């Protein structure tokens, strides 16, 4: 019988994800020598090398690649054993890891956190803000319990629970507020400012404009909605904004806001979680709180 420990598996998982001993040790809240020692002991126990170490990179060996998915499955199953005990309580309590996309987090989370603090004081909520592909990856690997994203995500292993829908609006320089609202053809001829690659909001805006995923004419990329609105205020171009962001992003910018005619561009926001999680009842309660806050 091979004598390996869950600690070794967690350190292996961290190193496989980060491909860097320092960052993996930081993620595990241990020193780098302690992590290195556990990895070495795991390799000695298995009698084979799991990582290829060079001066510039850490790579999984073929055996390490085979072990990686198995270790993730094992760790997820172990975490769900603890969730089984929590599920029997039926209360929204304990530690919960929630992922949120950046075009939702700053506008919705303050209201959600206020409601949770008042109605569910025993809940210890950990927030992870990132783009959809990363959140879905962390969710399927068991590093998050749930995530708030734009639907659909179309992952067979995930449950999708709709929360609300919201329209997109056009934000343009203040001195252009008297101009007619452009249609899709007009937008394609404008200097369109959108979020950089990886944001689902970018893809939704491009879809509305009937643009390919490559760069349309004169499009510039920004890292946040705040950046885009300030660039519009400076007269650099126009952008689309989800309705929930209007109050925050336009209050200090000299811009004009225009609504598109029906059918308006919109998105559907929802929560997703693993179909296998024992915490479905608690996550449904959390979805109700988010829906009410929105």
Image (cartoon, rainbow, N blue to C red):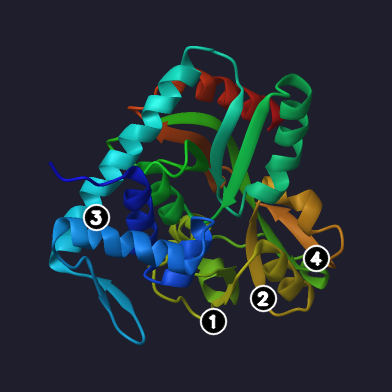
Residue at (53% x, 44% y) in the render: 267
The x, y position of residue 179, in whole percent, is 74, 66
Left/right of residue 119 with respect to residue 66 in the rendered view: right
Left/right of residue 283 with respect to residue 76 in the rendered view: right
- Nearest to viewer (mark 3 / mark 4): 3
The x, y position of residue 269, in whole percent, is 53, 39
User: How far apart are the alpha carbons under marks 3 and 1?
Assistant: 43 Å
Q: Which residue is mark 2?
A: 237
User: How far apart are the alpha carbons under marks 2 and 3?
Assistant: 46 Å
On screen, 53 above or below 67?
below
Left/right of residue 77 with respect to residue 193 in the rendered view: left
Q: Which residue is mark 3?
A: 68
- Earlier in the chain: of badge 1 and badge 2, it is 1
**Crowd band around label 3 with a 10 angstrom C-alpha radius: few (<14), some (14–19), many (20+):** some
On screen, 282 above or below 136?
above
- Earlier in the chain: of badge 3 and badge 4, it is 3
Q: In this orientation, which residue lies closer to the viewer: 43 or 158?
A: 43
Residue at (47% x, 68% y) in the render: 32
Residue at (47% x, 12% y) in the render: 88
Q: Which residue is mark 1?
A: 218
Q: Are marks 1 and 2 in contact (CB under 8 Å)?
A: yes
On screen, 211 above or below 117?
below
The x, y position of residue 234, in whole percent, is 78, 78
Res 119 → quadrant = top right
Q: Which residue is mark 4?
A: 255
Left/right of residue 140 with respect to residue 44 in the rendered view: right
- Earlier in the chain: of badge 3 and badge 1, it is 3
Q: In this orientation, which residue lies closer to the viewer: 171 or 200?
A: 200
Q: Secondary structure at mark 4?
A: strand
């Amino acid at each position: 019988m091979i004598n390996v420990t869950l600690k070794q598996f967690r350190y292996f998982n961290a190193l496989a994800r980060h491909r860097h001993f320092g960052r993996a040790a930081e993620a595990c809240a241990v020193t780098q020598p302690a992590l290195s020692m556990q990895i070495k002991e795991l390799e000695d126990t298995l009698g084979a090398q799991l990582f290829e170490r060079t001066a510039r990179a850490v790579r999984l060996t073929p055996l390490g690649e085979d072990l990686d998915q198995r270790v993730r499955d094992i760790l997820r199953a172990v975490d769900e054993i603890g969730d089984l005990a929590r599920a029997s309580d039926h209360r929204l309590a304990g530690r919960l890891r929630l992922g949120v996309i950046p075009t939702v987090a700053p506008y919705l989370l303050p209201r959600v956190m206020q409601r949770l603090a008042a109605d569910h004081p025993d809940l210890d909520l950990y927030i992870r803000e990132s783009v959809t592909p990363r959140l879905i990856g962390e969710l399927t690997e068991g590093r998050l319990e749930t995530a708030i994203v734009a639907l659909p995500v179309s992952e067979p292993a995930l449950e999708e629970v709709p929360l609300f829908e919201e329209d997109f609006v056009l934000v343009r320089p203040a001195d252009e507020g008297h101009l007619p609202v452009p249609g899709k053809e007009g937008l394609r001829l404008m200097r369109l400012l959108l979020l950089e690659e990886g944001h689902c909001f970018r893809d939704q805006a491009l879809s509305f404009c009937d643009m390919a995923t490559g760069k349309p004419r004169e499009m510039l990329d920004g890292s946040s909605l705040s950046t885009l609105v300030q660039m519009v205020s400076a007269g650099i171009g126009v952008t689309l904004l989800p309705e929930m962001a209007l109050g925050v992003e336009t209050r200090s910018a000299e811009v004009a806001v225009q609504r598109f005619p029906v059918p308006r561009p919109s998105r559907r926001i929802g929560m997703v979680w693993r179909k296998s999680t024992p915490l479905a009842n608690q996550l449904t309660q959390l979805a109700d709180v988010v829906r009410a806050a929105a």
